[in-house]
Every structure is written in structure tokens, then in C-alpha cells.
Image (cartoon, rainbow, N blue to C red):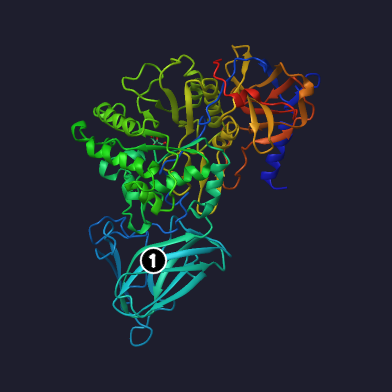
Amino acid sequence: MDSHYAARKKVLLFSLVTFCTFYNCYASVVNASQTAWLSVNVSDSRVRKIPHTMFGLSFEEINHSGAGGLWAELVSNRGFEAGGQNIPSNISPWSIIGDKSSILVSTDRSSCFDRNKIALRMEVLCDGNGRNICPAGGVGVYNPGFWGMNIEQGKTYKVTFYVRSLQPMEMSVSFVDSNGLRTLATADITDGNVREWTKKEITLEAKGTDANSRLQLTTTKKCTVWLDQVSAMPLSTHKGHGFRNDLFNMLADLKPGFIRFPGGSFVEGEWLVNAFRWRESIGPWEERPGHFGDVWQYWTDDGLGYFEYLQLAEDLGALPVWVFNNGVSRSEQVDTSIILPFVRDILDALEFAKGDPTSKWGSVRASMGHSEPFDLRYVAIGNQDCGNKNYHGNYMKFYDAIKGAYPDIKIISNCDGSVQRLDDPADLYDFHVYTNANSMFSMAHNFDHTSRSGPKAFVSEYAVTGNDAGRGSLLKALAEAGLLLGLETNSDVVEMASNAPLFVNANDMRFTPDAIVFDSSKVYGTPTYWMQHFFKDSNGATLLNSKLQPSSLTSLLASVISWNNPEDNRSYLRIKVVNFGSSGVILNVSINGMDQSSIEAAGSTITSLTSQNVMDENSFNQPKKVAPITSPLGKVSNKMNVILAPHSLTCIDLLRKSNFIEAVASEDLHTSI
Ligand code: AHR
């Protein structure tokens, strides 16, 4: 038995004994030194519908989340623009195959694309015969992608590039392993006349697998050849939309109510010139200039652009929340007196997303394959910009223009409305919290005393950071679970919440910890990712009135929801409890207004997220060391004793008899608790 399996088995045994009915309690197994009571009143009319948008995702182009991550493009710096528009330019991570006796590589500004003029020039000095014979395999260039391309046997890849040559072209396009010795797929392309820029597109089927492959373009023929916009895409992406399947599925499994994009500080830029610009990120991918994200210090070709973000939201069944730059970067601000062109730019973007296909920008969207408008209902004016001198002035210009053109769009302000009224009108206000575990857990009560009228909160970035968090500890996840239980309880004033950052490429761990870790071929969820699974059915569910006692036991937090599962069309009662303390707790649960006969034992479960050490983390070697474990409840009762392990998150799902109709949830009652 390997150690991973052994560890899992231990946790499983542990969690199997954490549940017991009232008369058969396994209190002796876990040292439960404390006792608490949770009472739920199912027939209490003081219930609340949790917003459908309550829990979602915050996607930022950070840590190579998109470029080299969710966006499946394998080539990094496909247009050779990353070194800047001046020549000579740095072509990294491209490398040269051959030495100076056989090939000279440089950049010039001869591209056929107006917005990205840099092209690669290769002067091949060697030949197939004569005095300077090319080395076996030829000379040329290769691209290692983002720390290696994942090429898999039997899978097909579309390679596209633009080429021009003074002589007839003979080129090999190949995927090879990391040291260039083993060819995984190859094709020869010849063309007698490529004197003008010509697009070449081929499909390669891999005959071998290597997660650290590279793409190379080589020749054994003396020539002068230019290359530009070299792309390699796996054919199998989510719906063919360009999203890496495994990473997309991780997101879809969370059933997100919304997805915020593309940042974060990525939206702001350190300098305005480097901020994300929607207009530069739409249209044919070859024509996009790309940009250097100077906050997170890497180049993106902007294959994942404004259109693709909207498509991603649609594919996830989540509402898009677009965060746009309001003329404020981290080191620079546009004066309100000259902000109008920026405002017009955003109105164009909204027309692109929402306009009729016959409108100017709606027609551009339609030409990209989406004639129906996207369901864009939320926009955020900036990211973390409230304290900036020009924010208020700029904000009002954007606010008035957007509300004038699109009165239904909900506008999110960067200013914190949780403690005092906002100075400016807004539908929601953005709230970010990065702190240690204890403070995060206490944040569960942050909105208890917030005014019940006025804009709603969007907790768009929350995370435990620092020593408590490691690279994604159980402790981090439990503290964050505490926050989310508090947000559920306060879902009359909190409309949305998302953890941040969402993704990290293991080769660029710039901002850690994150919810999902990946490399070119593998992915795992940190405990924070798994914690969010406990909340994924809360969107649109009914929050029931519950009471946890004694109130002095501050390390416990709970919430109870009633929800309908569309997959089996059944109704469930879900009790979630986080034990943030280091002692086990006997929790006496009593459910009033529901007798035992209305619960089905088969189908009722208990799920627990815990581990032997509160600082335990997941890794590529042990991807599910800390992950939820679900067991059947066996006996069910409306009076139960549950033993909560120290440092654990527990979820009890009670399946209601099939004749139960979830009237409350479907009627959308607004009675406040
Ligand atoms: O989530 C990482 C960063 O933290 C975001 O870009 C920024 O909004 C916050 O400071």
C-alpha cells in the first residue's frame, strides 16, 4: 500500500466515525472535549434566498493563469513581439537551432500585421549539398512554450504560421522532446512561391508523449526566410473555444455563479501603457499586438482576450463581471478633465459585448462567431483604486455614461461601503481582504452590522496569506470557510464572493497561495479549492434560520441551507460547520419542523475536509492529501450527534423524501433573518 493510499485511508476511517446518531455516539474515538448545540427550524418562515451570484470566481492574468495556463496556446511569444517594438529585439523564449556558420537569426519590422510589426528573419547559410552542409535535422528555431509543451500521443495539434521567403520554401515543423532528440510529430511543408507573406496551417498527430516538448521549425535548404505569428493549439479544448480542458473542468466543478476578469492589478498596470486594453485583445489572434503585464512581469499574446473571457463565462454558465481600467494605474492617473476618450472606449466595449449584431461593435463580436449578445450585467470601475486622487472624478464620468446607455448594468465601486455610506452612487462595492487565519475567521462577522440598505458587497478577493497560508494549507481553507459561512449568513448585504488568486502555474509562483496549481500537464486543487466545493450549491439556495450554542464557543461557525439538486431533482438540507479550534467538538444537531420519516437514509451523507496537521497541503505527488471525503450517513435522524474533528469543515447533507417540494427556494422569499 503506498503512503498516499495509507494516509487517505486513515482520514477516511477518521471521518467515518465522526457521525453518530443521538444514542450511538462515537465520542471516544476523537477526543471531543467540548459540546455545542445547533438547532435548525425548517418550518421557520424567516428564511432568505441566497443570491444566484453568491459564490463565483475571480480570474486574473497572474501567475501565468491564462497565458501558459487556461488558454491552451502552446507557443509563448508567438509573434516575436515580447522583446518590444524596437529592433534588434529579444525573441525569448525562442532559441536558435544551429550555429553562426549555418544560420543567422534577427528581427526586423517587416510583418504583414500592422499592429505587431516584428517578424523573425532567418538567413540559412548551410544547404543540403555543397561545401556548407546543414547539420542532420536542419537549422532553425524552436519554442519551448511555457516551461514545456504537453504533447500527448494520439492527440492532434493545429500549427499555424506566417512565412515569407526569397527562395522556394522547404520547412519541417515538428514537436520534439525537451532535448530535441525524439520527434513526437512532424510534417514537411514545401511551397515554390512564398515571396509574399503566406499563411500555413497543418495538423500534427503526436506519436509519442512528453509534457516538456517544444515546437521547432527547421530547414536544410539555403534560404532567407521570415516567420511570424507561430501558433500551436491542441484541437481538443473545451468546445473548441481554446480553454484547456482539465483547468476548465476544475472551474466548472465549482458551479460558479459569476466570473470576474481579467484582474486584479493586471487591469491597472503599473503604468497605463501596460494596462489590459480590451480593444487590442479582440479580432483575429494574429492581429493582436499583445502586451507586457508589468504588475506581474510577463508578456501575454492576448489570445485570451475580452471576447474569450466573455465566452469563458458563458461556457461556465457564470455571469461575466468585467473589471476595466478607469484611467488609473498603480503609478499614474489620467486627469478627470481628459477622461472622456477612456469613457467612450468603455462604451464601445459594452456595445461589443451587448450590442445588436448590426451595431458597429456588436458586428465585430458577430464576426468572431458570437452573434447573440453576451449576458454582461456587471462591471467594476477599476481595481483597488478608491484611494487615488482622480478615482472619484473618473468614476462618476464612467458611472453616468454607463447608466445612461445601459441602465440595467450593475456598477461596482472600488470604495468600501461596509462601514460607512459611499460618497458616490453604486450598485455594489468591491471588498478585498488578505490577512492571517485568525483575522480571516473573525471576518465572518464583518458584515453583521453593515447597513441593510444601500449598495451590496462584492467580496471579490479574499485569501489567508503569510505563514498561516503556506502554499495552501488546511488552516487557510478553514479560516476562509469561516468567512464564507459569515457571508452566507449576511447574504442580504453580500451579493458575491470569490477567492483570489484562482490559478498558479507551478513555474511562476509569483503570488501564492492560490486555489488551483498546475503545470503543462498536471493540476491539483489546494484545500481552499476543495473548501469552495462545500459552498457550490449555495447559489440560489434557501438560507434557513439556525442557532449555534454556546455563543462563547467562538471557534465554531455554521450555516444551514435547503437546496434543490437539478442533477437528481431532489431536495436536500445541508448543514455546514467549521471547527476552527484544536479540540474535537460534540455537536448536537436538532432539526425542528422536520420529522425523521421525511429524511431518506440512502442518499444522506456526511463530508469532511480535515487532515492530521492543520498546515498540511496538497502537491503534485499528493494532490488529494487534503480533500473532502464523503461517507453515507447510515442512520438518519432529526436529532443527531456529530463529532467535529479538530480543525475541520463538515457538511451533512440530508436527502428529503421525494414528495417534499422545496417551496421556499422556488418562491424566492425575501424575508430577512
Ligand atoms: O489577487 C492578487 C492581487 O491582490 C490582485 O491583483 C490585487 O487586486 C490584490 O492586491
| Residue labelled with disc 1 | 161
Q: Residue furthest bottom?
A: 130
Can you give x and y, in whole percent of width and height, for residue 207 in the image?
Answer: 57, 69
* Residue shown at the point (31%, 29%) measured from the top left: 399
Can you give x and y, in whole percent of width and height, for residue 605 in the image?
Answer: 72, 31
Can you give x and y, in whole percent of width and height, for residue 224 in the image?
Answer: 29, 75
Q: Residue furthest front?
A: 358
Q: Looking at the picture, which amino acid does disc 1 mark?
A: Phe
Instruction: Name the one closer to the observer, 433 or 34.
Output: 433
Q: Is residue 485 above or below residue 11?
A: above
- Left or right of 471, for residue 323: left
Q: Is residue 80 above or below residue 135?
A: above
Q: Residue furthest left?
A: 337
* Residue shown at the point (55%, 39%) measured from the top left: 526
Q: Quadrant of ligand 1?
A: top left
- Res. 498 in view: yes
Q: Is mark 1 within 8 Å of ligand 1?
A: no
Circle 1 residues within 10 Å: few <14, some 14–19, many ≥20: many
Q: Quadrant of residue 607?
A: top right
- Left or right of 103, for residue 147: right
SS at circle 1: strand
- Left or right of 202, for residue 649: right
Q: Is residue 277 above or below residue 15?
A: below
The quadrant in which the C terminus is found is top right
Q: Quadrant of residue 16?
A: top right
Can you give x and y, in whole percent of width and height, for residue 60 in the image?
Answer: 42, 41
Instruction: Name the one closer to the observer, 672 or 223.
Output: 672
Q: Quadrant of residue 431?
A: top left
- Res. 26 in view: no
